[in-house]
Amino acid sequence: MTELPESVDRDILAGRTILAVKTIREAQGCSLDQAVDLYHQRYGELHPEPDSAREIPRPRVLRFERDGTLVVLEGLEDGQKPKK
């Protein structure tokens, strides 16, 4: 990634998106679209997704039993029906 001022990282971590994008534009002399792309790239570097966020969640089936308890069936394949 292109060298950016330290204030960009501070603004990203503090949630000051507009200030970060403005600083990127000024430092790089680029368009708004390019600055936003650089912002998203740097944001991703500072906030990596945990491995669990990358996993595709499995479908769940929630079912209430006659006695009022809730049964959660997880990990069913698409189209697979819960056993009764």
Image (spheres, helix red, strand yellow):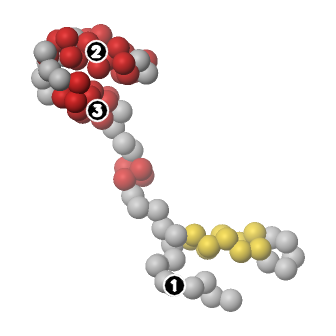
Of the image marks 1 and 2, the number of the one nearer the N terminus? 2
Residue 53: x and y in percent read 41, 50
Marks 2 and 3 in Cβ contact (< 8 Å): no
- Could one spot residue 45 in this view of the protein? no
SS at circle 3: helix
User: Does 58 sit above or below residue 8?
Assistant: below
Name the residue: 29% across, 20% down. 21
Q: Amino acid at mark 1?
A: Gln
Residue 79: x and y in percent read 49, 83
Residue 23: x and y in percent read 26, 12
- Could one spot residue 55 in this view of the protein? yes
Residue 47: x and y in percent read 36, 33
Marks 1 and 2 in Cβ contact (< 8 Å): no
Of the image marks 1 and 3, the number of the one nearer the N terminus? 3
Name the residue: 31% across, 17% down. 20
Task: Please give the residue where the numbered disc 3 appears in the rendered image.
Answer: 40
* Image quadrant in which the N terminus is located: top left
SS at circle 1: loop
Q: Decide: few, some or many residues near mark 2? Use Cα within 10 Å; few <14, some 14-19, many ≥20.
A: some
Name the residue: 18% across, 28% down. 34
Q: Decide: few, some or many residues near mark 1? Use Cα within 10 Å; few <14, some 14-19, many ≥20.
A: few
> Relative to 21, is 60 on the left or the right?
right
> Relative to 3, is 35 on the left or the right?
right
User: Does 71 sit above or below residue 45?
Assistant: below
* Image quadrant in which the C terminus is located: bottom right
